[in-house]
Amino acid sequence: MHDHILRDNFQKRFLEKTNLVNIPQIYGQHIRIVDDLVLKENKFEERIDDRDILMRFSKKEKIMILEEYLTFENDTTQSNKYYYFRKKIYGGEWVIPKAKNFTIQIEALFSFTKMLTKRDAPLFPVLIERETGVEINGNVDKMKQVYSIYREWLRQNKYNDFEKIELPLKNSPYRWSGEDCNIKEYILETL
């Protein structure tokens, strides 16, 4: 196991938390990919799909970003991350998910997962226990298990050079809301 993935105080190179916004409708913080070009050219950086930013990074750097996402395991700060969700009929919109317990901890795992998918994957940032159908966002013990699953998934895929990607929670006791749909068509072939 890679110890630097487990440390909360791991020095991040690619990810950072934004300043706290103290406005009720958008209260919280979110994780931002450090990218000078985006910050310089776009004052609405919170509404840029992270996958568009990641296109400029090498495979090695993308793997380092995945590792950095896992350092947010214990961060229960409320997230105000915008995601683009496709509407069923025409178009879509940028929204902050109104999921219960949408924290930085959940945002990190969800953003990690979105890095492995194409646009419009029907996922929502709510973790669900497969057997019971119960939401586990905010359940400390189950979140430790999910983070452990992601770490093992990353270790195995680094070893296999990301030859055949599947979502980290496949065949686990947990899933993302929407993952039970035909998700396979939305998964990238490689990083």
Image (cartoon, rainbow, N blue to C red):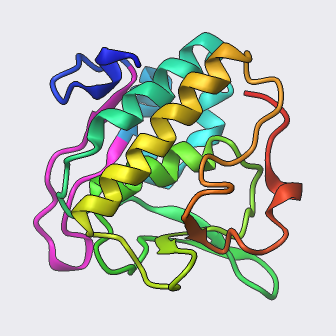
Task: Reply above or below: 60 against 121.
Answer: above
Q: Nearer the viewer, residue 144 or 117?
A: 144
Q: Position of residue 123 (x, y in %)?
A: 63, 68
Pick the front one: 107 or 131: 131
Residue 17 placement: quadrant: top left
Residue depicted at x 58% and y 35%: 153
> Which quadrant, please, contains the C terminus?
top right
- Quadrant of residue 155 within the rendered picture: top right
In the drawing, does residue 6 fall left or right of residue 120?
left
> In the image, residue 106 lies at what x, y percent?
37, 58
Location of residue 151 in the rendering, given as x and y in whole percent from the top left corner: 46, 33
Q: Dividing the picture into quarters, in which one does residue 189 lie?
A: top right
Please check the rendered image and state whether residue 28 is part of the magenta-colored stretch, yes or no: yes
Main secondary structure of the magenta stretch: loop
Is residue 35 part of the magenta span, yes or no? no
In the image, residue 132 sits, relative to residue 102, either above or below, namely below
The N terminus: image quadrant: top left
Q: What is the magenta range? A: 14-31
User: Can the viewer see residue 129?
Assistant: yes
Instruction: Decide: is 179 above or below 149.
Output: below
Q: Is residue 17 left or right of residue 92?
A: left
